[in-house]
């Protein structure tokens, strides 16, 4: 048997080495591609809007702005934290209406404003849990389908809730809103941690 093995041409053994090298390079390329695919597309970070007890996770670094708006017939300062990631707009809006009796009207006005701005129809509503939210205004996750001012499709999901005299709106907008990513955002909402 040894004699038979010793008669094998050496080039047959050497001929497999380039194939092994190519296979190794191919496997390395696959590994690098898989590692790139595993890198997070959304960079979640904790956000605490100033002047509130709200804590939320947002998938990008938000820009902050404050402007006066009319909300349910009352002028208030609306604070907005918003950013873009994965072709989606992520936003947190907050305002203090100053009187517990105005909270329900302010939440209704925020909802109507969202629907009007997107010329949207409500396509689904489900209960939402926001830890620490005031019990009087039950949070709900609202799904909408509409159009942006440029005519392009806009789908969105938003959650409205209150804490004391502060009203909050958490929003995700885009051509298509993935439930898992929106769920991470909405499930992170907590007041008074």
Image (cartoon, grey):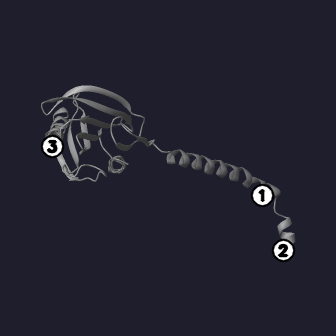
Residues marked 3 and 1 touching at CB (< 8 Å): no
In the image, 93 versus 119, the foreground residue is 93
In the image, 112 versus 32, the foreground residue is 112
115 on left or right of 57: left
Mark number, residue 1: 2
- Residue 98 image offset from top left, x and y in percent: 20, 35
Frontmost of labels 3 and 1 is: 3
Secondary structure, mark 3, is helix
Mark number, residue 30: none
- Residue 142 image offset from top left, x and y in percent: 22, 47
Secondary structure, mark 1, is helix
Q: How many marks?
A: 3
Frontmost of labels 3 and 2 is: 3
Distance from Cα at disc 1 to Cα at disc 2: 18 Å
In the image, 5 versus 41, the foreground residue is 41
Q: Earlier in the sequence, mark 3 or mark 1?
A: 1
Residue, disc 1: 13
Residues marked 1 and 2 touching at CB (< 8 Å): no
- Residue 81 image offset from top left, x and y in percent: 34, 33
- Residue 111 image offset from top left, x and y in percent: 18, 40
Residue sitting farthest toward the front: 99
Q: Earlier in the sequence, mark 1 or mark 2?
A: 2
Q: Residues within 10 Å of mark 1 (few under 14, many from 20)?
A: few
Quadrant placement of the N terminus: bottom right
Distance from Cα at disc 3 to Cα at disc 1: 80 Å
Say which residue appears at 55% left-offset and 47% top-offset: 35
Q: Residues within 10 Å of mark 3 (few under 14, many from 20)?
A: some
Residue, disc 3: 104
Secondary structure, mark 2, is loop
Q: Quadrant of residue 107?
A: top left
């Amino acid at each position: 048997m040894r004699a038979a093995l010793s008669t094998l041409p050496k080039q047959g053994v050497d001929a497999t080495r380039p194939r092994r090298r190519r296979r190794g390079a191919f496997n390395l390329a696959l590994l690098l591609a898989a590692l790139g695919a595993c890198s997070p597309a959304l960079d979640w970070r904790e956000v605490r809007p100033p002047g509130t007890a709200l804590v939320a996770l947002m998938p990008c670094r938000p820009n902050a702005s404050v402007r006066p708006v009319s909300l349910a017939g009352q002028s208030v300062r609306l604070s907005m934290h918003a950013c873009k990631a994965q072709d989606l707009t992520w936003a947190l809006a907050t305002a203090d209406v100053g009187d517990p009796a105005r909270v329900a009207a302010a939440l209704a006005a925020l909802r109507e404003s969202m629907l009007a701005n997107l010329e949207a129809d409500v396509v689904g509503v489900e209960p939402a849990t926001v830890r620490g939210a005031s019990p009087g205004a039950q949070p709900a996750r609202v799904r909408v389908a509409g159009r942006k001012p440029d005519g392009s499709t806009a789908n969105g999901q938003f959650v409205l809730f209150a804490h004391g005299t502060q009203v909050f709106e958490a929003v995700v907008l885009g051509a298509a809103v993935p439930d898992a990513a929106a769920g991470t955002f909405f499930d992170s909402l907590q007041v008074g941690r």
